[in-house]
Image (cartoon, helix red, strand yellow):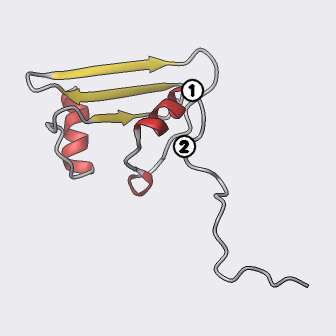
């Protein structure tokens, strides 16, 4: 727990003591995920290991992101929370022929 809290503070420059904020971590083995949350009187450590498959997870500090509760639910269901090729709005739509 202390190692994860230090990573939050020094690597990501965030406050691990923010109450009710869940920080998620995934190592090289993407079938396991850890969560750390400060509850005001101590840390709660969560751990999930998948029997089959793996989590789609950022690999660098630059890819780290804040996710919504809906994205969290998607992640726990094994879905990707960031599209590989997201749909983009066209700035200049094609003209009708």
Query: CB atoms at circles 2 and 1 under 8 Å apart?
Result: no
- Image: 81 above or below 27: below
- Image: 32 above or below 11: above
Q: Residue at x 64, y 19 (%)?
A: 52
Q: Which residue is drawn at 22% across and 32% down?
A: 20
Q: Which residue lies furthest to the left in this view?
A: 41
Residue 3 is situated, as x and y percent measured from the top left of the image, at 23, 32
Q: Which residue lies furthest to the right in this view?
A: 97
Query: Few, some or many C-alpha atoms within 10 Å of disc 1 (few <14, some 14-19, many ≥20)?
Result: few
State the residue in front, 8 or 42: 42
Q: Which residue lies furthest to the front in this view?
A: 96
Tell me the residue that label 2 is attached to: 81
Q: How far apart are marks 2 and 1 (CA)?
A: 10 Å
State the residue in front, 35 or 68: 68
Q: Residue at x 25, y 41 (%)?
A: 7
**Tag 1 secondary structure:** loop
**Tag 2 secondary structure:** loop
- Give the number of the disc on residue 77: 1
């Amino acid at each position: 727990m202390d190692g994860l809290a230090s990573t939050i503070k020094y690597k990501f420059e965030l406050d691990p003591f923010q109450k009710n904020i869940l920080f998620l971590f995934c190592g090289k083995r993407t079938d396991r995920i850890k969560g750390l949350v400060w509850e005001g009187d101590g840390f709660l450590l969560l751990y999930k290991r998948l029997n089959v498959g793996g989590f789609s997870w950022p690999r660098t500090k630059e890819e780290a992101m804040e996710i919504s509760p809906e994205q969290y639910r998607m992640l726990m269901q094994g879905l990707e929370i960031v599209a590989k090729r997201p749909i983009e709005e066209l700035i200049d739509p094609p003209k009708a022929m």
